[in-house]
Image: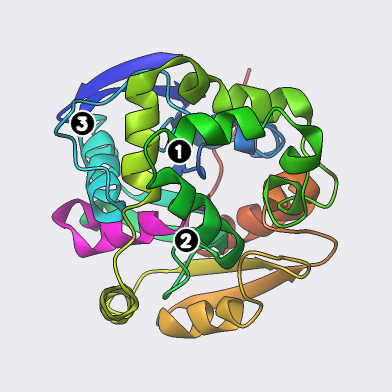
Amino acid sequence: MREIELSSGTIDYQDTGGAGPVLVFCHGLPMNGAQWRKVVPLLSGYRCILPTLPLGGHRRPMHPDADLSHRGVARLLGEFIERLHLDEVTLVLNDWGGGQFLLLEEQGQRVARMVLVACEAFDNFPPGPAKAMALVCRLPGGVRFLTQLMRIPAFRNHRNGYGGMSLRGLPDELIADWFAPATRSRAIRRDFAAFATSAPGRKTLLAWSEQLAAFDRPVLVVWAAQDRLMPREHGPRLAQLYPKGRLVEIAESSTLVPEDQPEQLAAAITDFLTETGAQPVRQTG
């Protein structure tokens, strides 16, 4: 695991290296790069970079004055891309959709294309079933209470919570890893709560969405047919929002398509990349 010091604090990240086109993968709350562990090995010929953003699954707390709103984390993502001198980036999102707001910032010029996989969009921040979690996080000690609840299998696997994000079911050890930092650290719980409660009102979210239509580069929207968090109609609506958007729907999957259908997702991403000028670089010798 590598690290880089940014204005809000130290960010850990994985980097597969190589000379191939750059793909930057973002994750959900409070996840990390393990969300993509089944997909990245299927994308040979590409340089895959996976930052652990401060969404609650990060190991290092941010500075107390860090802006951990959706726009703030998007700007931090842009700073990360800029500091690594990455250009012509393919930004890949799943679950957390706030990475799209990077396009509204100056660093968004470094994004050549996007892959939006069953993610928050329009006014769906946070998704319906997750709104209750945001309310809990507003309470004193709310995040700590949530981490304790996640130890109870019936709560952890509930279909209106993390249990509903994957049709295959999420391994207990994976969820434990995602919640471990907030379980151990008060400062991480502070960051978790700051992000989880930061979504602006519906009017603001829809105004930001309208501005995203100015992004005239290729966008692949991948939607899950059995998703309980992201509305079915948001897939085609997102594909229509972006001038060069296209839609692929994947069956037998919920929100975490990388978990449920990694092979289909990797194939869709590879086809999109090659069709839009990001050919993989194969090693020789």
Q: Nearer the viewer, residue 39 or 150?
A: 150
Q: Say which element carries label 3.
A: helix
| Residue position for label 3 | 83
Any part of residue 31 in sight: no
Tell me which residue sits at (66%, 33%) in the image: 150
| Residue position for label 1 | 142
| Residue position for label 2 | 126
User: How many discs appear?
Assistant: 3
Q: Say which element carries label 1.
A: helix
Q: Earlier in the sequence, mark 3 or mark 1?
A: 3
Question: Where residue 237 sits: x, y (%)?
Answer: 52, 84
Q: Earlier in the sequence, mark 1 or mark 2?
A: 2
Query: Which kind of residue does numbered mark 3 sit on?
Result: Arg
Question: Where residue 81 sits: x, y (%)?
Answer: 28, 38
Mark 3–mark 2 distance (CA, rounded to whole Å): 29 Å
Tell me which residue sits at (77%, 55%) in the image: 159
The question of residue 109 being in magenta is answered with no
Mark 1 vs mark 2: in front: 1
Count residues near mark 1 (Cα–Cα under 10 Å), then give few for <14, some for 14-19, many for 20+: some
What span is colored magenta in the figure? 94-108
The question of residue 103 being in magenta is answered with yes
Query: Which kind of residue does numbered mark 1 sit on?
Result: Gly
- Outermost residue toward the front? 140
Q: Nearer the viewer, residue 129 or 225?
A: 129
Mark 1–mark 2 distance (CA, rounded to whole Å): 17 Å
Marking on residue 212: none
